[in-house]
Amino acid sequence: MQDKLDLYTDYLLSSFGQTSATGLSRLVEGEISHDKISRFLSGNDFTSKTLWQKVKPTVRKYESDDACLIFDDVIIEKPYTDENEMICWHFDHAQGKTVKGVNMLNALYHTQDSDSVAPVRLTIGFELILKTVLF
């Protein structure tokens, strides 16, 4: 499982355009079929706990007393997708209007690496904002 997850996340991070299971399969010259990738993604429950388990060793590496947690929400626009409890209307303060999409709250660990001038920011948790009451 870990190899597929690493491959998939590397693919997402290195892509500049649209991504798909078919695109990843083409990239690895058919070594892994797009069906196998789709089954892997749909057959696992990737949660905030899963993310924490993945990034915890890195957080521990850069852990410091001067670190802080930053909470930030983001709306991933999905204007053409049917509405449901996850994809619905949210007020976007940056645009000053309501947009249809997925609202997600992120927790970031922020610290300064003593060996670098660049700060270290790691996403350590997330929560999808669901609107379970439709009207």
Image: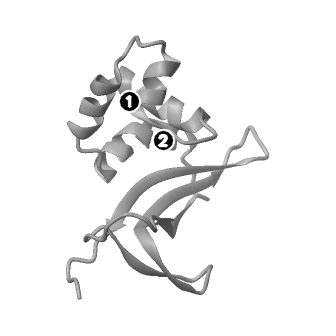
Left or right: where 134 falls relative to 121:
left
Left or right: where 91 falls relative to 89:
right
Residue at figure coordinates x 48%, y 12% from the top left: 29
Are there few (<14), some (14-19), or many (20+) residues within 10 Å of tag 2? few
Residue 40, given in percent of the width and then of the height, sits at 27, 30
Q: Earlier in the sequence, mark 1 or mark 2?
A: 1
Residue at figure coordinates x 60%, y 33% from the top left: 14
Residue at figure coordinates x 42%, y 28% from the top left: 22
Furthest residue in direction front, as rendered: 80
Q: Is residue 50 visible?
A: yes
Q: Is residue 1 visible?
A: no
**For the residue marked with disc 1, what is the amino acid?**
Leu
Report if the CB atoms under discs 1 and 2 are less than 8 Å apart: no
**For the residue marked with disc 2, what is the amino acid?**
Arg
Give the number of the disc on residue 5.
Answer: 1
Q: Quadrant location of residue 135?
A: bottom left
Left or right: where 120 falls relative to 126:
right
Placement of 81 over or under 54, stated as above or below: below
Give the number of the disc on residue 60.
Answer: 2
Figure quadrant of the N terminus: top left
Spatial distance from mark 1 to mark 2, Cα to Cα?
A: 21 Å
Is residue 5 or residue 72 the one in the foreground?
Answer: 5
Residue 66, given in percent of the width and then of the height, sits at 61, 59
